[in-house]
Amino acid sequence: MKQTLICSPKKRKNKKAFTIIELLITSLIFAVMTQLLYSALYTSIKANKIVNYSFNIPRKALMLSKLFERELTGIYLPEIIPIPKSKKGKKQKRLSKYKMKFGLIGKEREIHYTTLINLDEQADPAIGDILEIGYEFDSGDKTLTKRVDPYIDDKLDKGGEKRDFKMSLESLKFEYYGKKWESSWNSIKKKKLPRAIRISFELIEVNERDQYTEDEIKAMAFKHQILVLLPNAVDNKKT
């Protein structure tokens, strides 16, 4: 006589696939593991960017320091020089109507001066080695603007061509030393140049700030200060 195996209802239930609860738990574990992996990769990428910024910023700070030092040490002394009239050259005829002012006008966030250094920005080498240069820092937009004027006139802080100086500056400050440190200087009124100029600035080379916390941004900031001694710091003379 054949025996027939009959499965009980309990045994049939045990042979079923994963339950909904088991699937939810598995999905939750997978999501947590994915999130942890993403966080680890994101943190690693961010740390790598911070290290790269930290290495690049000192190089840019040195470049800016050298630029200021090269230009400021060549500040030209005479305050006013009349241009003699001449029939040679239209430019000289046009400039002969004005008096040329030399020296320095500076405030905390801007500086304007004439320099003897022959720079690459010089538009016409035939005019000479004297340039009128200005820097202005906008603390709101965090932008540094450079102005270059190859034609010296009676307005030391105006004229020329302006362009945005591509530098991620958080702050910039100029100070001037005569007998003490001052926040402004006008060589036309004082009849002399300051003995030294101190420039303090802070660089933060971050493209996407919303991806970093305030502490991380502060950690990437590079504070730098340079002191430029002016070799021509004597009383100006009118000629």
Image: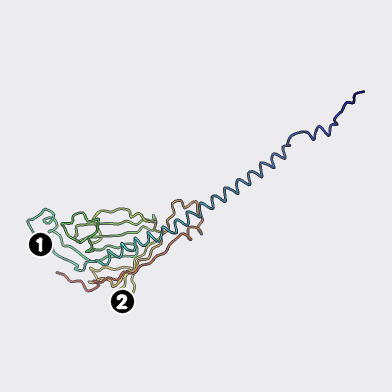
Q: Position of residue 170 (x, y in %)?
A: 41, 59
Proximity of marks 1 and 2: CB atoms separated by less than 8 Å: no
Q: Nearer the viewer, residue 64 or 99?
A: 64
Q: Is residue 116 left or right of residue 94?
A: right
Give the residue at x 35% y 54%: 166
For the residue marked with disc 2, what is the amino acid?
Answer: Lys
Bin the neighbour count of mark 1 within 10 Å (Cα to Cα): few under 14, some 14-19, many 20 and up. few
Image quarter (top left, top right, bottom left or bottom right) of the C terminus: bottom left
Bin the neighbour count of mark 2 within 10 Å (Cα to Cα): few under 14, some 14-19, many 20 and up. few
Relative vertical location of residue 2 with respect to residue 95 in this rendering, above or below: above
Determine which of the numbered discs, if any, sits on residue 179 in the image. 2
Q: Nearer the viewer, residue 143 or 188?
A: 143
Name the secondary structure under disc 1: loop
Total of numbered circles in the picture?
Answer: 2
Q: Quadrant of residue 80?
A: bottom left
Q: Position of residue 1 (x, y in %)?
A: 92, 23
Relative vertical location of residue 34 with respect to residue 133 in this rendering, above or below: above
Q: Nearer the viewer, residue 62 or 196?
A: 62
Q: Residue furthest right?
A: 1
Q: CA distance from mark 1 to mark 2?
A: 37 Å
For the residue marked with disc 1, what is the amino acid?
Answer: Pro
Name the secondary structure under disc 2: loop
Mark 1 highlights which residue? 84
Q: Nearer the viewer, residue 164 or 116?
A: 116
